[in-house]
Structures are given as structure tokens and as C-alpha cells.
Image: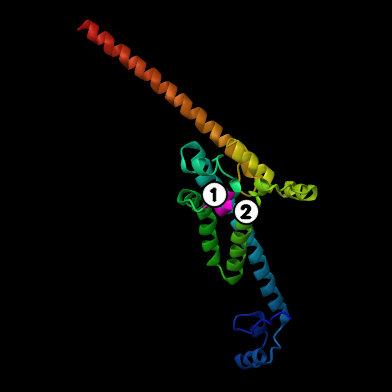
Amino acid sequence: MLPRARCVPGTQGYANGRTKTDCNRLNRRGDWDSGAGNAFVGDNIMMFFVALVIVLVVGDLASTFLYHVPQHLWGKLHLRTHHDRSRSFWDHAVLSKDPQVLLDGLLGALPYIAIALGLATLGPAAAAGAVLGLIAGQLHVWWRHTTDLGWKTPPWVVKACRALQIVLPEDHDGHHRNPDIEYGDIFRFYDAPSRAIITYVRAFARRRRNALRRLQRIRALRSLRNTQRA
């Protein structure tokens, strides 16, 4: 049975001729209109699912572009641990107690945790949705590393995940073996922009290095000419 809303000052029922005494009596009897109660429950259900989706979608966005992509461009920790082919990727994701592996996992998870903590301040429903989002994200971590255990995704699951752009274990295994493809922890729609950013930054870095080398050669030639004139 859905909870009934309370009759409180400032509400429509309070203004429609009900005195404070009437409200107190209705609240004790539970006779107050259940329509507002239904709306309250509906709002909480919506907030629950919105928080859940935000943790997963925005968390993956932040983790991908604030940690994962920068690590592939300039870092060493992630490449040294997450793409270490000398051991099972299932060991990396689930079993390993290596401090560097745990640190890599924690840094990748921090955006999800920070977003969940922010949502938790919006109320119990949002907090519950955020917690479930974190749990779902962790379950996906374990699932996407199961190819080493012989997992093969059933065709109907593949179709559903492709429709929702969810990363499959086979997709993530491809990223382990080739660090330049299949970006996004949970959602594949972050793959294309991640590749574009990495391609642009690497090309810019190459142009900058080439320009600096040319500048160094020019300075060296000028220095040599000045020395010869002297």
C-alpha cells in the first residue's frame, strides 16, 4: 500500500478551507488525499533511476576522459597494469592484490564514487540509486573480464548490449590486446571521441616536436655562423 501524503500548511488541501486542526485530524486518521502520496512515490522512483543512470553514464564519461584517455597519452601506471599481457586479465580485475593494480582500479573508479557521493546528498532515493549504480558498475567490471575464463556472450545478449551501446567482454578483451581501440568502461559510445582526442593530441605533439627540432637546427646554424664571423 502506498504511503499517504500529510496535510501540511501551504498545500492545496490546507488552503481549501481546512484549518490546522482539520489537518491534524486528517493526518492522525490517514484520510489525506493519496494522490499527493502517489506523486511523492513516483518522484522518488524517478530520482532512484535517474541517479542510477547518472552514476553509470556520467561516471564512465568522467573516468574515460579524465583518467583513461590521459593515461594512454601520458601515463604509465594504466598501461603497465591494465595492459600487462604476462598475466590473466581476470587476475588483474578480480584477484590481484598488487598495489599498483589496485591503485589503477581506484583511480579509474574515483569519478564514479565522487558522482555517487554528490547524488547521495539529494535524498534517500537518489542515494539508493547511486549505490546500485556503483554495484552495477562493479559487476560490469567483473563481467567484462571473463573472456579469460572462456565466457562467450550469447547472441541475444549481444543484440541487447549493442542496442544499448554497452561494452561486451569481447569488446574489452580487444582493448586489452590493442590499447588503441574499444575505449569506454561501460558504454561504447565513448570509443569514437576517445580515439579522436588521442589521434589529435598525438598529431599535435608530433608537430610540436618537429617544430622544436627545426628551431634547434636553425639556432645551431645561426650560432655556427656567428662563430665563423667572429
User: According to the image, label 2 marks what residue?
Assistant: 142
The answer to whether residue 129 of the structure is visible from this angle is yes
Q: Secondary structure at mark 2?
A: helix
Residue 230, image x, y percentages: 19, 7
Q: Label 1 is placed on what type of residue?
A: Ser
Image spot of residue 173 (x, y percent): 64, 42
**Residue 3: where, in percent of width, then height?**
69, 81
Q: Residue at x 55, y 63 (%)?
A: 119
Report the span colored magenta: 91-96
Residue 40 or 165: which is nearer the viewer? 165
Relative placement, left or right, of 131 versus 158 is left
Q: Is residue 167 visible?
A: no
Question: In front of the other: label 1 or label 2?
Answer: 2
Q: Residue at x 59, y 63 (%)?
A: 130
Residue type at the position of mark 2: Trp
Instruction: Please tell me whether residue 9 is drawn above or below residue 60 in the rendered image.
Output: below
The stretch drawn in magenta includes residue 163 = no
For disc 1, the neighbor class at 10 Å (few under 14, some 14 to 19, many from 20) is: some
Q: Quadrant of residue 116?
A: bottom right
Tell me if residue 40 comes above or below residue 213 in the rendering.
Answer: below
Q: Which residue is mark 1?
A: 63
Q: Position of residue 146 (x, y in %)?
A: 66, 49
11 on left or right of 158 = left
